[in-house]
């Protein structure tokens, strides 16, 4: 342990760490003792000399340390095996029969900062967001294979470390096969009885928006006989669930031609060709203005508008504009499913925005439910930044 670099915090900056927050910002550091290279393990101490924990250091990142433990322990294979196995057992019972696609490891939420692993059938997709996890890629791949072996998976592990945030860590983007057979262009998966084909090599995120699973299922239960507008549809997952729930008609809007082509395939794959559906390729902000009112359900699931706190004012205008138009298009008794996937957008602010859109639309609106991410996306309570998805389900009276 003595050979590990030591990070000494400024006076008072130990408080969040003592409460269990896994991040140390560079501004909180008084001194670094020893040479450090990105991704190395270091020890964190308070100004008064108290040991606070061990974590991955990256001097190039604003988050200079991501703590892995508050104990003095060996951060070797057994440590990571135990964390991976704990993450897997959380999903085991629940995923059975409901889906074969879910998040296996959710970074900080599973006490493995910087590591994301998603499962799509027999394929695992791994994403390293930090230099520390990047260094451990080989060992993590080996451990995942070993821990999943009793279930005869994975057949392949594919890396999708091609996210922009890696640049803030001084890391290049990486993708490619880490283990097993080459991954086909499309991997098939099942979610609550609906089938989807996922492009894990090139699709958005790791190929699919797993975090919306329960919200899609909720929509399915309400879709019978309804006319539905699915804005920011991506490959049509909400629409397919709506169709299989008996929707009368579905309109999908997205700017990505590839995503809409896949959505069309998803209708066939689920034998939903007979459900009237149409695709609008374009910018939702423009397209929504040209639609005739008369929808029973409108879904708004845009990309994050506020990746940084400073974006909140423009993000708020975006959410307000979309909600206002959605309320205008909705019938009496109609439902709005509106989501924000920006951590910086709080529940309170999001609700106020939707409320002000309701006021401007001149309609009377009830909030009937709040929906977040499902439990394969757990949140470490000491790390509230992990909670990003916020959904409000509103009813027009
Ligand atoms: N609802 C989807 C996920 C949506 S992700 C699901 O359940 O799978 C956000 C989508 O918005 C992406 O497919 C992206 O192509 C699309 N998008 C981003 N900006 C857009 C815009 N201004 N107009 C239309 N689509 C947009």
Image: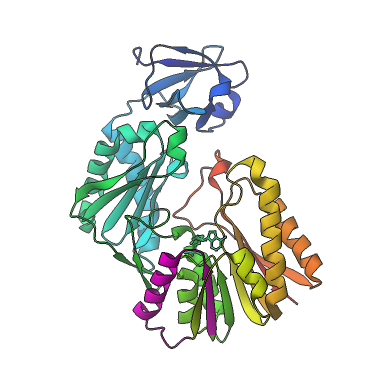
Nearest the camera: 358 or 390? Answer: 358
- Residue 259 forms part of the magenta stretch: yes
Q: Can residue 113 be seen in this view?
A: no
Residue at x 61% of width, y 73% of height: 298
Q: In which quarter of the image is the C terminus?
A: bottom right
221 horizontally vs 72: left or right: right
Nearest the camera: 124 or 231? Answer: 231
Colour pattern: rainbow
- The x, y position of residue 209, in whole percent, is 45, 59
The answer to whether residue 175 is above or below residue 321 is: above
Residue at x 48% of width, y 80% of height: 243
Please tell me in which quadrant of the rendered image residue 120 appears: bottom left
The answer to whether residue 291 is above or below residue 183 is: below
Nearest the camera: 176 or 296? Answer: 176
Question: Over which residues does the magenta segment extend?
Answer: 249-275
The answer to whether residue 354 is above or below residue 314 is: below
- The x, y position of residue 67, in whole percent, is 45, 30
- The x, y position of residue 95, in whole percent, is 38, 62
Please tell me in which quadrant of the rendered image residue 244 appears: bottom left
Q: Quadrant of the N terminus?
A: top left
């Amino acid at each position: 342990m003595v050979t590990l670099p030591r990070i000494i915090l400024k006076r008072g900056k130990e408080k969040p760490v003592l409460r269990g927050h896994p991040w140390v910002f560079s501004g909180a550091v008084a001194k670094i003792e020893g040479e450090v290279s990105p991704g190395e393990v270091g020890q964190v101490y308070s100004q008064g000399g108290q040991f606070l924990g061990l974590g991955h250091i990256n001097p190039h990142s604003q988050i200079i340390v991501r703590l892995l433990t508050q104990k003095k322990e060996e951060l070797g294979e057994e440590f990571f095996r135990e964390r991976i196995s704990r993450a897997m057992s959380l999903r085991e019972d629940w995923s059975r029969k409901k889906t074969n696609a879910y998040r296996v490891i959710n970074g900080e939420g599973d006490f493995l900062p910087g590591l994301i692993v998603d499962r799509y059938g027999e394929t695992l997709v791994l994403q390293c967001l930090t230099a520390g996890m990047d260094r451990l890629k080989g060992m993590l791949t080996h451990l995942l294979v070993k821990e999943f072996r009793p279930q005869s998976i994975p057949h392949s592990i594919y890396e999708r470390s091609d996210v922009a945030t890696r640049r803030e860590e001084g890391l290049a983007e990486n993708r490619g096969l880490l283990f097993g057979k080459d991954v086909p262009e499309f991997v098939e998966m099942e979610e609550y009885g609906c089938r989807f084909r996922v492009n894990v090599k090139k699709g958005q995120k790791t190929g699919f928006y797993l975090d919306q699973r329960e919200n899609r299922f909720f929509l399915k239960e309400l879709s019978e006989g309804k006319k539905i507008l699915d804005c920011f549809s991506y490959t049509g997952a909400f629409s397919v669930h709506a169709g299989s729930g008996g929707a009368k008609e579905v309109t999908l809007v997205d700017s990505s031609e590839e995503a809409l082509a896949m959505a069309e395939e998803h209708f066939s794959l689920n034998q939903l060709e007979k459900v009237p559906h149409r695709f609008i390729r374009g910018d939702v902000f423009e397209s929504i203005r040209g639609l005739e009112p008369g929808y029973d359900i409108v879904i708004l699931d845009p990309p994050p508008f506020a990746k940084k706190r400073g974006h909140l004012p423009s993000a708020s205008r975006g959410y307000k504009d979309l909600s206002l138009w959605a309320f205008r298009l909705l019938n009496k008794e109609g439902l709005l499913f509106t989501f924000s996937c920006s951590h910086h957008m709080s529940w309170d602010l999001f609700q106020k925005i939707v409320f002000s859109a309701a006021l401007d639309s001149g309609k009377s609106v009830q909030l009937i439910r709040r929906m977040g991410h499902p439990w394969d996306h757990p949140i470490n309570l000491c790390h509230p930044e992990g909670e990003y998805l916020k959904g409000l389900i509103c009813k027009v009276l």
